[in-house]
Image (cartoon, grey):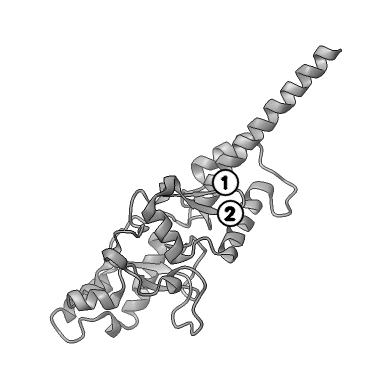
Amino acid sequence: MKYIDKKGAPRDYLDWCNANKGLANEDYRCLQNPEKASLHEVLMSEQGDICAYTMRRISASSSHIEHIKPESLCREELRGSDLDYRNLIACHPKEGMVNPFRYGAQEKDNWWAYDGRDFVSPLNQKCEVKFAFNLKGEIAAVGNDNAAKTTIDVLKLDHPSLTEDRKRAIDEFVLGANGDEPLSPRQAAQAITSICSPNNKGRFAEFCVAIRHALVEYVANEEKKAQQRKFAQSQQSKRK
């Protein structure tokens, strides 16, 4: 999961919310284009065009506006609270898919046990250190953190299909597109510090946090191999 730094809602969305405050239309279900499309675009932009839950690459045609706290619960508690920008993110898959997706936002659906206390939000500044990834694309809760384990289960972040997609991205980054151009330990170490930074278009690399974790493991493995080679060479020199 990649931390999302909320920047602020688009002006036309705020104007729409203000214009409908206290009226029957003060309801997310009443929001239409162009304000809804503008909102969607800004959410994707502040997320660097990756899904807030899965870190998959997203676009306007492959994602939807997601309420972290389910919108129906928001409406039950306070009218108009389903429009709170701080509760809105962009997630895979697209809106209106008939068949539920196997992981992510649609898998979470309306889950919100214990008022979300056991859910790690991508708006939590510490969310990136709550989960660990390896070179195989596998995910685990750091330190058996209960909220992280619950979040993995609720979002099915360990789904085999998503794990395979993460591994593909990791392999391509570490080993090259054809698997025959591995990064040097020095290149990998440099990439660790930059992989989670946006590019010049403001986009994050797909699965960037997973790749960063995998790079740390890769560097450690390469250093261990180098030490083993050095030891083997020293032993060979002694025999001579």
Q: In the shown orientation, is residue 104 left or right of residue 217? A: left
Where residue 138 sits, quadrant-wise, is: bottom right
Dividing the image into 4 quarters, which one contains the C terminus?
Answer: top right
Residue at image x 27%, y 74%? 13
What is the C-alpha distance between the residues marked 2 and 1? Answer: 8 Å
In the rendered structure, which amino acid carries the disc numbered 1?
Ala
Q: Mark 1 sits on what residue?
A: 214
Element type at mark 1: helix
Dividing the image into 4 quarters, which one contains the N terminus?
Answer: bottom left
Coordinates of residue 98 in the picture (x, y in percent) = 49, 85
Question: Looking at the image, is 211 positioned above or below residue 99?
Answer: above
Question: Looking at the image, is 236 positioned above or below residue 157?
Answer: above
Mark 2 vs mark 1: which is more N-terminal?
Answer: 2
Any part of residue 49 in sight: no
Query: For mark 2, does the 10 Å Cα neighbourhood hold few (<14), some (14 to 19), or many (20 or more) residues?
Result: many
Coordinates of residue 46 in the picture (x, y in percent) = 38, 60
Any part of residue 207 in sight: yes
Question: Looking at the image, is 185 positioned above or below residue 9?
Answer: above
Residue at image x 55%, y 64%? 159
Total count of labels: 2
In the rendered structure, which amino acid carries the disc numbered 2?
Gly
Query: For mark 1, does the 10 Å Cα neighbourhood hold few (<14), some (14 to 19), or many (20 or more) residues?
Result: many
Q: In the shown orientation, is residue 134 left or right of residue 183? A: left
Element type at mark 2: loop
Coordinates of residue 71 in the picture (x, y in percent) = 29, 75
Residue at image x 71%, y 27%? 228
Q: Are marks 2 and 1 in contact (CB under 8 Å)?
A: yes
The label on residue 137 is 2
Q: In the shown orientation, is residue 64 left or right of residue 26? A: right
Seen from the viewer's position, the closer of residues 188 and 168 is 168
Question: Looking at the image, is 227 positioned above or below residue 88?
Answer: above
